[in-house]
């Protein structure tokens, strides 16, 4: 089952703007928006509108020529108003590019990842039950990094385009959960 990725503007930092269909995000001038409880104010970022508590899910992000960005997943309970560090201890399983030439896994301490060439499109694969988040270079299907943990609450896709005016474009999200597979199997018989 494939549905489009949709960003949740209610979680977006004040300096982000979106495409009409809420599938592209980029840095922009500050907007006057309500400081609602969901809004992320400590980092220039946004969450996906759909969170997950089970199943396998994947989405592909076109980071283009962006020089500073972070993508991955975040817990629903992350700190949204206070300064935070992007790490699993804080509820983030993300990788990021710094200065256009250094790729990092946001661990504690963060880990530099090998990079032959800067990836332009990255697929994020979430396996909720196994606690895995895998990042894959969509150009050649090579694995960039894998996080292994245990999820106990809803997780959301996480996106931060950095301070660059280049868009981060989200492609499709493929949803597959055991409940859906079981229902499909039962309807066959």
Image: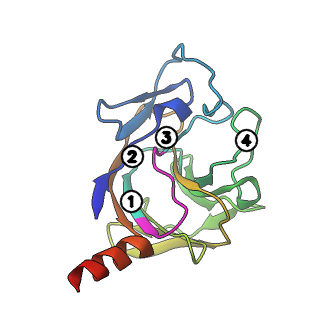
Q: Main secondary structure of the magenta part?
A: loop
Range of residues picked out in magenta: 48-57
- Say which element carries label 2: loop
**Residue at which label 3 appears:** 161
**Decide: marks 3, 1 in contact (CB < 8 A)?**
no
**Decide: marks 2, 4 in contact (CB < 8 A)?**
no
Drawn side of residue 50 relative to residue 95, left or right: left
- Say which element carries label 3: loop
For marks 3 and 2 on the same chain, the one whose residue lies earlier in the sequence:
2
For marks 4 and 1 on the same chain, the one whose residue lies earlier in the sequence:
1
On the question of residue 182 being in view, the answer is yes
Query: Does the stretch in magenta take in 54?
Result: yes
Rendered image: mark on residue 65: 2
Residue 160 % position (x, y): 53, 42
Residue 136 % position (x, y): 43, 69
**Decide: marks 4, 1 in contact (CB < 8 A)?**
no
**Residue at which label 1 appears:** 59
Characterize the local packing of mark 4: few (<14), some (14-19) or many (20 or more) Cα atoms within 10 angstroms: some
Rendered image: mark on residue 79: 4
Query: Does the stretch in magenta take in 132?
Result: no
Quarter of the image that includes the N terminus: bottom left
Give the vertical position of 80 relative to 69 (above or below).
Answer: above
Characterize the local packing of mark 1: few (<14), some (14-19) or many (20 or more) Cα atoms within 10 angstroms: many
C-alpha gap between disc 3 and disc 1:
16 Å
* Residue in the picture at 38% in, 59% down: 59
For marks 2 and 1 on the same chain, the one whose residue lies earlier in the sequence:
1
């Amino acid at each position: 089952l494939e549905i489009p990725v949709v960003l949740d503007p209610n979680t977006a930092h004040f300096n982000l703007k979106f495409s009409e269909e809420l599938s592209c995000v980029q840095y922009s001038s500050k907007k006057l928006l309500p400081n609602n409880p969901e809004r992320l104010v400590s980092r220039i970022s946004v969450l996906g509108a759909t969170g997950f508590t089970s199943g396998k899910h994947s989405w592909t992000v076109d980071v283009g020529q962006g020089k500073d960005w972070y993508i991955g997943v975040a817990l629903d309970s992350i700190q949204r108003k206070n300064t935070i560090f992007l790490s699993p201890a804080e509820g983030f399983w993300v990788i990021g590019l710094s200065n256009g030439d250094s790729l990092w896994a946001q661990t504690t301490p963060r880990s530099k990842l090998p990079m032959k060439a800067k990836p332009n499109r990255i697929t994020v694969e979430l396996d909720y039950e196994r606690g895995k988040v895998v990042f894959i270079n969509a150009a050649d299907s090579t694995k960039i990094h894998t996080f292994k943990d245990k999820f106990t609450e809803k997780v959301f896709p996480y996106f931060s385009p950095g301070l660059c005016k280049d868009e981060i474009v989200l492609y499709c999200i493929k949803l597959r959960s055991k409940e859906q597979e079981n229902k499909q199997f039962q309807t066959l018989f």
